[in-house]
Image (cartoon, rainbow, N blue to C red):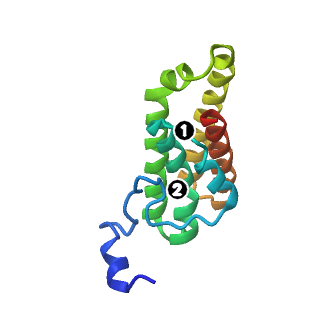
Amino acid sequence: PPSAEAKTALRGKNGALSSPSDSGLGLFVDQDGVSLLRLAVPDTDSNAREVQGRTELVLLRLQQVGFSGKPQIWKACEKDVEQAAAVLTAHSDEFVGKVAPKDQAEAKIALASVSKNLEGLKQTIKDQNYEATKESQTAAANDMAKVRE
């Protein structure tokens, strides 16, 4: 296990752990089988993986760092969702363009669902409602995995 010094060195000024690494999970250990399967969807699009990773990171951050009385952790989660939404918005056309023409309408619907779920996730995070955040995070992560398939 990491020493107390190592843990302290990895924390930012506000107590939130550093941003995710290339795997999208950074310092967090993902033990949820469903989440691992969503992250393992084979895909070469780094933007899609970033949206997926940042969406998955929300729940991992809350579960492993804690959330009760930790507004900086909620703020870090909100930032993850904002970044995921920004990447999704900026690259939606690219995502759709990689889908077979016959499936593009369905891809657009799926992306709209991801966007809607990210907005809901952002609101539950602002409300600091852990149970609602879990539900919203799962919905957004599942929809993004469908897009990536």
Tell me what residue is drawn at x 53 percent, y 19 percent. Answer: 97
**Dot 2, crowdedness within 10 Å: few (<14), some or many (≥20)?**
many
The image shows residue 14 at horizontal and vertical percentages of 34, 66
Quickly name the residue at label 1.
43
Tell me what residue is drawn at x 46 percent, y 49 percent. Answer: 80
Q: Could you tell whether 84 is left or right of 105 in the image?
A: left
Q: Nearer the viewer, residue 45 or 136?
A: 45
The image shows residue 102 at horizontal and vertical percentages of 68, 14
* Among numbered discs 1 and 2, the one appearing first in the sequence: 1
Q: CA distance from mark 1 to mark 2?
A: 18 Å
Tell me what residue is drawn at x 48 percent, y 69 percent. Answer: 70
Q: Say if residue 53 shows up in the picture.
A: yes
**Dot 1, crowdedness within 10 Å: few (<14), some or many (≥20)?**
few
Dot 1 amino acid type: Asp
Q: Is residue 68 above or below residue 35?
A: below
Q: Is residue 50 above or below residue 73?
A: above
Tell me what residue is drawn at x 35 percent, y 70 percent. Answer: 11
Dot 2 amino acid type: Leu
The image shows residue 7 at horizontal and vertical percentages of 37, 78
Q: Is residue 102 above or below residue 90?
A: above
Quickly name the residue at label 2.
57
